[in-house]
Image (tube, helix red, strand yellow):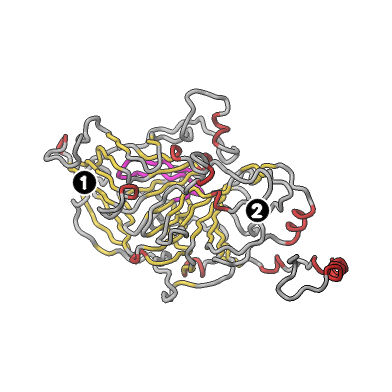
């Protein structure tokens, strides 16, 4: 049962950075939003220990002949047993009944709006170089749609059976899950609420995740999603064969971007009931269910480095140029998931939010570019420049690798003619990007959605030829220096 939330709330959509909530130097400062009802443990990838009943966890061993209080020891492993120590992930759970106590599996009907195989041989996926945008996806007003049944796939790459790839989804829900629990056996979920908070009960404890925050639910972890604010909508990045980690900081040193201590994991909170529970499993994109007569959340204590966690994007420490130049968007990376190619991540999660822009003699908008990454952007709140007018909170925007990017001519002209002021940008806005080195294909649901719009290529029709207006000057220079041989232009 969730504790009562406080009424002393801050409008986090209006603040520039988390530091504004602490600027009076009040001691103690608060680490979570004031309406968050739960306690957490801090640190990314740490070996954590949590006991709902003190003295439960055995010391010096993990699986003694008898665990205190008659509990069962159960290990959850997320890596090969022989994986190097720095990537070896596991957790020990001390629970009333082990997860094996269930009544078998049965297959559930497929969700026609989800997809897991993004190989071009699949007739239900679509390939396009066109820039696409989706208007906000509607939250159903009728029926009982939960986080699981309201999940719909937009795009992805690979296949979970290959243990290499990813999928991007949206969820729209109007009903809390009650005595149902979901477990994704395919991969990790990175969840981005856009409308309405999520109260998530996991085997490791509770997470309260609001718009502006994200949470990661690891592969194999059971959880139930409730909707404390009513109907909810958001985004999901699912990765296969990898786990999220913090990006390397290189010359930044020890601090910056997303700091390790700002990631929060739950504390143990057990539940012992004799109610009938339905456990929904996702395996290779297929859904299965099993039933059991006890709560899946009966873990009294746990320890390990494999657990769900959350992060508040208002704590992200932006970096950038303070002289000239437009730095690559990798500076906005919160989390990355490595691929088998050491030089190309499987997926990055980037955040774009209020920040200062101070570079001088620099073209202010993103420069025209063709980058190798596939990009799917979402908007949590506010207005975000650089995308079409159809890019709205709750919608999405997609660009495949090497598709040209850039603003329309009026923005180019204004940015070229006017000196950029020192200014705050993206005020009151929070956008994000799911980025991947993999080429995305589009799901049937997204391709046929009535929310889909193509970026209008006519927006670039008025990108005029400025070079030809300098024809006389160019000819004079060519005469002065002599006509250059083909392939040596500009070499002197």
Describe the element under mark 1 as helix, strand or loop.
strand
Image coordinates for residue 31, horizontal then vertical, percent: 46, 33
Q: Quadrant of the N terminus?
A: top left
- What residue appears at the point 64 percent right and 59 percent down from the top-left corner? 388
> Which of the pair 19/15 is nearer the observer?
19
Image coordinates for residue 192, horizontal then vertical, percent: 47, 50
Choose top left, top right, bottom left or bottom right for residue 159: bottom left
Q: Which residues are magenta?
A: 191-210
129 left or right, relative to 471: left
Image coordinates for residue 415, horizontal then vertical, percent: 74, 53
Pointer 2 with pointer 1, Cβ within 8 A: no
Above/below status of 180 relative to 12: below
Residue marked by disc 2: 385
Q: Is residue 469 visible?
A: no
Choose top left, top right, bottom left or bottom right for residue 228: top left
Image coordinates for residue 238, horizontal then vertical, percent: 41, 57
The count of marks equals 2
> Which of the pair 248/448 is nearer the observer?
248
451 left or right, relative to 337: right
Look at the magenta stretch and give its main secondary structure: strand
Q: Is residue 185 magenta?
A: no
124 left or right, relative to 62: right
Q: Quadrant of the C terminus?
A: bottom right
Q: Is residue 36 visible?
A: yes
Residue marked by disc 1: 74
- What residue appears at the point 68 percent right and 48 percent down from the top-left corner? 324
């Amino acid at each position: 049962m969730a504790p009562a939330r406080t009424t002393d709330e801050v409008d986090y959509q209006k603040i520039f950075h988390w530091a504004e909530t602490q600027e009076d130097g009040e001691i103690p400062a608060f680490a979570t939003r004031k309406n968050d009802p739960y306690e957490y443990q801090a640190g990314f990838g740490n070996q954590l220990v949590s006991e709902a009943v003190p003295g439960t966890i055995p010391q010096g061993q993990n699986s003694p002949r008898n665990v205190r209080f008659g509990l069962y020891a159960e290990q959850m492993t997320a890596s090969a047993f022989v994986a190097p120590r720095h990537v070896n992930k596991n957790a020990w759970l001390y629970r009333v009944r082990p997860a094996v106590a269930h009544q078998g599996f049965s297959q559930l009907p497929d969700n026609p709006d989800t997809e897991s195989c993004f190989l071009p041989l699949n007739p239900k996926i679509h390939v396009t170089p066109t820039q696409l945008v989706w208007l906000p996806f509607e939250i159903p007003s009728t029926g009982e749609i939960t986080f699981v049944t309201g999940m719909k796939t937009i795009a992805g790459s690979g296949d979970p059976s290959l243990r290499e790839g990813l999928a991007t989804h949206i969820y729209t829900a109007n009903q809390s899950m009650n005595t149902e629990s979901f477990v994704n056996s395919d991969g990790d979920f990175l969840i981005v609420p856009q409308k309405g908070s999520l109260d998530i009960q996991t085997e490791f404890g509770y997470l309260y995740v609001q718009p502006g925050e994200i949470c990661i639910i690891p592969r194999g972890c059971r959880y139930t999603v409730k909707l404390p604010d009513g109907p909810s909508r958001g985004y999901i990045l699912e990765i296969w064969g990898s786990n999220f980690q913090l990006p390397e900081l290189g010359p930044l040193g020890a601090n910056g971007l997303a700091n390790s201590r700002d990631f929060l994991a739950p504390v143990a909170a057990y539940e012992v009931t004799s109610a009938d529970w339905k456990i929904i499993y996702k395996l290779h994109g297929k859904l299965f269910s099993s039933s059991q007569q006890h709560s899946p959340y009966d873990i009294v204590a746990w320890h390990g480095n494999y657990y769900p966690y959350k992060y508040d994007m208002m704590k992200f420490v932006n970096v950038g140029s303070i002289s000239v130049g437009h730095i690559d968007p990798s500076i906005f990376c919160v989390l990355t998931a490595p691929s088998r190619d050491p030089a190309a991540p499987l997926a990055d999660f980037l955040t774009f939010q209020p920040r200062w822009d101070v570079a001088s003699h620099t073209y202010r908008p993103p420069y025209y570019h063709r980058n190798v990454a596939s990009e799917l952007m979402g908007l949590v709140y506010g207005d975000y420049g650089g995308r079409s007018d159809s890019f709205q909170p709750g919608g999405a925007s997609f660009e495949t690798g090497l598709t040209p990017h850039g603003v329309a001519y009026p923005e180019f002209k204004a940015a070229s003619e006017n000196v950029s002021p020192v200014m705050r940008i993206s005020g009151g806005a929070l956008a994000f990007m799911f980025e991947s080195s993999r080429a995305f294909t589009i799901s049937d649901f997204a391709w046929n959605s009535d929310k889909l719009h193509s970026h209008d290529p006519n927006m670039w029709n008025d990108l005029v030829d400025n070079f030809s207006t300098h024809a006389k000057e160019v000819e004079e220079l060519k005469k002065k220096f002599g006509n250059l041989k083909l392939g040596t232009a500009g070499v002197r």
